[in-house]
């Protein structure tokens, strides 16, 4: 059985046992189910699952931080009397190999204001990204690779 499904089932059982199915009981039940699964982390499946949740939360917080920063940058550029637009298309070499990893990376980039994933090369080795502000293409590539791609690969592998 998929451990995420088992974890959600344990959360639902907890809420039913508490007699009130609401978000608080479901959330606490999910955390309790996660703790139970983590106690059995000697099995390979549980070990992989119990390490993914903290990585997923880390990716979420990193995305939210980047979202706030890019919103401020875009708003500043739009409202500034002297905007510093330096648009460009940058090819980012990919370490991501599967369609799921590439899709998640491209979606996170596209959801961040000021950037847009345009295309993936036919050999799936390069992601082309349009950015509103590209002063240094190499620094832009490093930002994508050290930021989103590294965290996506930590989560997915």
Image (spheres, rainbow, N blue to C red):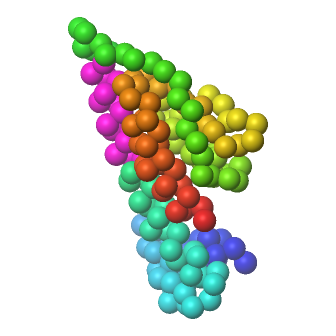
Q: Is residue 123 above or below residue 7?
A: above
| Magenta span contains residue 74 | yes
**Residue 100 x/y as whole percent:** 68, 52
Please state the total of marks drawn on the protein image: 0
Residue 133 quadrant: top left
Q: Quadrant of the N terminus?
A: bottom right
**Residue 60 x/y as whole percent:** 44, 53
Say left or right for 62 vs 6.
Answer: left
- Seen at 63% across and 84% down, the residue is 44
- Seen at 75% across and 41% down, the residue is 123
What is the chief secondary structure element of the magenta stretch? helix
**Residue 112 x/y as whole percent:** 45, 35
Say left or right for 85 vs 144.
Answer: left
Say left or right for 116 vs 5.
Answer: left
| Magenta span contains residue 58 | no
Say left or right for 151 vs 78.
Answer: right
Q: Is residue 48 above or below residue 107?
A: below
In the image, farthest residue toward the left: 81
Q: Is residue 129 above or below residue 49?
A: above
Residue 43 quadrant: bottom right
Residue 7 visible in image: no
Q: Which region shows up in magenta?
A: 63-77
- Seen at 53% across and 69% down, the residue is 52
Q: Quadrant of the C terminus?
A: bottom right
In the image, farthest residue toward the right: 122
**Residue 66 x/y as whole percent:** 37, 42
Residue 98 visible in image: yes
- Closest to the observer, 47 or 27: 47
């Amino acid at each position: 059985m998929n451990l995420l499904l088992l974890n959600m089932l344990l959360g639902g059982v907890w809420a039913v046992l508490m007699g009130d199915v609401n978000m608080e009981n479901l959330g606490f039940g999910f955390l309790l189910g996660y703790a139970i699964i983590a106690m059995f982390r000697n099995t390979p499946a549980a070990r992989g699952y119990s390490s993914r949740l903290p990585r997923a939360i880390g990716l979420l917080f990193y995305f939210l931080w980047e979202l706030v920063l890019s919103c401020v940058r875009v708003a500043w550029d739009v409202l500034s009397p002297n905007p510093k637009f330096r648009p460009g298309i940058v090819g980012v070499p990919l370490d991501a190999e599967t369609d799921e990893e590439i899709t998640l990376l491209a979606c996170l980039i596209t959801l961040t204001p000021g950037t847009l994933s345009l295309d993936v090369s036919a050999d799936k080795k390069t992601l082309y990204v349009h950015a509103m502000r590209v002063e240094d293409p190499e620094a832009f590539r490093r930002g994508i690779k050290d930021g989103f791609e590294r965290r996506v690969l930590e989560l997915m592998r």
